Image (spheres, rainbow, N blue to C red):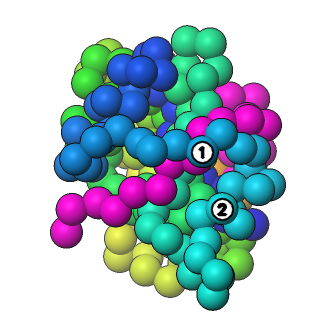
Amino acid sequence: MNPSYCRIRTPVDDALQRFAAWQQLPQVGPFVTTNPFEAVALACDEQGQWRGHAVLVSDLGGWTLFQDLTGGLGAIAAAQWLKFAAADELIFAGYNDSIPYGELVAIRGGVILREFLWDRSAPEANVNRGCLDCVDEPFQTWVEVASFVEDDDLGFSETGRLWIYRPMP
């Protein structure tokens, strides 16, 4: 499995505008209302290739969730996430069990609380800074990130709006 997501504590309309600006996209949307199980098929062309980066965006009542379908949000430095988060609370978390990889970034009040990256194939890129106050620490490998992702009730939604986009190079 390789689930990853970003959740930000801000209304969905604000989050969508900020995400588009952060990714340097010319517009917000278009969207297709769907569920996570159909979203992957909708995000692929007839040959099974991704049409672009794809996120499933959900309003979780105070939080906006971006479920990353294509991996386009992985390996983004915490400083870049901070630009998106501004003063709002943000969690980015994801893992891939087929290539032992886990990543977590936590931001609150304009401060990076936690930045963790564990990649068995590129140990020189690994990062382990800060402390996240809502889980038992310390993270040691991708396994702890996977547990965090699986236990996070705000990391998954059964409905949302599929957004396929192409970021600026």
Q: Earlier in the sequence, mark 1 or mark 2?
A: 1
Residues at badges 1 and 2 in contact (C-beta under 8 Å)? yes
Q: Is residue 148 at all visible to an observer of this figure? A: no
Q: Is mark 2 on a helix, strand or loop?
A: helix
Tell me where residue 102 appears, x and y as whole percent. 57, 60
Q: Residue at x 43, y 76 (%)?
A: 123
Q: Which mark is residue 128?
A: none
The residue stretch that appears in magenta: 146-169
- Identified at 61% across, 31% down, the residue is 58
Helix, strand or loop at disc 1?
strand
- Amino acid type of the residue that numbered disc 1 sits on in the rendered structure: Val
Does residue 64 appear in this view? yes
Numbered label tally:
2
Q: Name the residue under label 2.
A: 42
Query: Which residue is drawn at the image coordinates 28% and 42% (left, top)?
Result: 27
Of the 4 image quadrants, the one containing the C terminus is: bottom left
Q: Position of residue 115 (x, y in %)?
A: 40, 45
Image quarter in which the N terminus is found: bottom right
Observer-nearest residue: 68 or 121?
68
Gap in angstroms between the C-alphas marked 1 and 2? 9 Å
- Residue 32: mark in rendering: 1
